[in-house]
Amino acid sequence: MKPQPHLRLTYKTKPDQPLALSCRVGIGQLEAFRTKPWHNCLAIWDMGASNTSITQDVVDALQLSHHTFVRVDTALGSAMAPQYLVSILLPNGYQIKSLAVTLGKMVAPLQVLIGMDVIAKGDFSLVRGKETCDLHFTCPSLGLDNHHKEVKRLRALDAPDKPKVAPFTPNQSRNSPCKCGSGEIYKRCCEEKHRAEQAEAWKAAQPQVPPAEEAEPVPAAGA
Ligand SMILES: [Zn+2]
């Protein structure tokens, strides 16, 4: 899978229900020692967590061994938790290698909690629509002052109701003799061909937006 710089996930919003920003990710052993395929896990994006954590099932499935213990602060207080080094494969194919994650408890079927240590590696935006909410994550960061501008552009490209029209600027007057020397006026000669060529070039220059992925419903965190 070729990595795409942008990850876009679309969630259906329901009135009076908290939005769970979940998606499928792969968790893997560190690159150098990887002998197993990516372990497919259900993850949740959590801006309230400073560190990414994984459940005991993931530790067992990948036969991970901790390299240290770290202090983890939660709403319930602080405790020591084992820390593991893993790689994460995001749904856009982007890999975050050598990430230190801690062991955490979560409500099944969640297995991974994506914290600010991952989110801060890129540009993160949530864009609320009428009945949907789009999560945009660009990693590595584009270093833009306003990721929302980029998101707006990407959304415009995605909008199904807006026809994608290639702009056309003729390089000569439409009613003057065509520059090809045929003797015909431009609009009856090469204009159509130029239009097609420009449309083709415009299409090729459009950034590739990965398709939105239907999110899987999960119980609200902490429920
Ligand atoms: Zn011509």
Image (cartoon, rainbow, N blue to C red):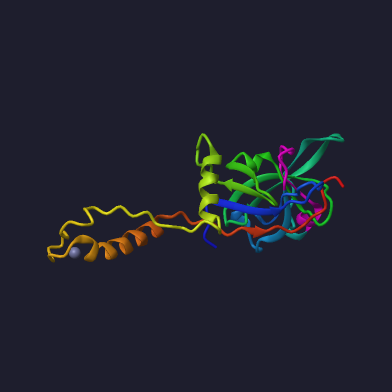
Q: Is residue 25 left or right of residue 211?
A: right
Segment colored magenta: 45-60
Q: Of residues 214 and 37, which is closer to you in this image?
A: 214
Quarter occupied by residue 185: bottom left
| Foreground of the two, 89 or 210 | 210
Residue located at (64% from left, 59% from top):
213
Q: Is residue 195 above or below residue 115?
A: below
Question: Which quadrant of the figure has residue 69?
Answer: top right
Residue 82 drawn at (x, y percent): 78, 43
Q: Position of residue 163 (x, y in %)?
A: 49, 59
Q: From the viewer's perspective, tell me whether residue 132 is left or right of residue 108.
A: left
- Taking the image as four quarters, which one is ligand 1 found in? bottom left
Residue 56 belongs to magenta span? yes
Give whichever of 173, 12 is nearer the camera. Answer: 173
The percent coordinates of residue 60 (x first, y second) are: 78, 57
Q: Nearer the viewer, residue 170 or 37?
A: 170
Indicate the quadrant containing the N terminus: top left, top right, bottom left or bottom right: bottom right
Please tell me which residue is depicted at 64% across the width and 43% down the height of the picture: 118
Total residue callouts? 0
- Locate residue 37, reporting x and y percent: 65, 64
Residue 7 is inside the magenta segment? no
Residue depicted at 57% across the width and 53% down the height: 94
